[in-house]
Image: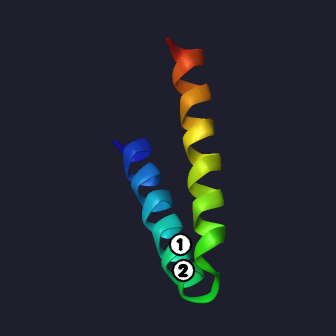
Amino acid sequence: MKRRNKTIGWIIAAAGVMVILSLVLPTSFWWFILGVFLICVGISITRRC
């Protein structure tokens, strides 16, 4: 249970950082970040399966 709360806390903190950065950075940057995120998720899924 403690590990789950820690993970949720990190997710909330990351979401807060994303909100602040979205106010400052241009739109094209966010498409790049989305692409990097999807590649990382795909790699992690293929390694676990």
Q: Considering depth in this image, is 7 or 42 the residue closer to the camera?
A: 42
Residue lying at the far front of the rendered structure: 28
User: In the picture provided, is 9 more to the left or to the right than 33?
Assistant: left
Closer to the camera in the image, 42 or 32: 32
In what element is the residue under mark 1?
helix
Name which residue type carries label 2.
Answer: Ser
Spot occupied by residue 7 in the image (x, y as percentages of width and height)? 45, 50
| Quadrant assignment, res 40 | top right
Which residue does the numbered mark 2 point to in the structure image?
A: 22
Mark 2, residues whose alpha carbon is within 10 Å: few (<14), some, or many (≥20)? few
Left or right for 19, reference 43: left
- Is disc 1 in contact with disc 2, using a CB cutoff of under 8 Å? yes
Image position of 28 with respect to 8: above or below:
below
Give 32 or 14, whichever is nearer the viewer.
32
On screen, residue 48 above or below 43: above
On-image quarter of the N terminus: top left
Q: Disc count in the image?
A: 2
Q: Amino acid at mark 1?
A: Met
Q: Which mark is residue 33?
A: none
Q: Is residue 33 left or right of residue 9?
A: right
| Residue position for label 1 | 18
Image coordinates of residue 19 in percent, x first then y, are 48, 79
Residue at 38 percent across and 44 percent down: it is: 4
Colour mapping: rainbow
Give the Cα distance between marks 1 and 2: 6 Å
At 56% from the left edge and 75% from the top edge, which residue is drawn? 17
Q: Nearer the viewer, mark 1 or mark 2?
A: 2
Residue at screen point 55% across, 30% down: 42
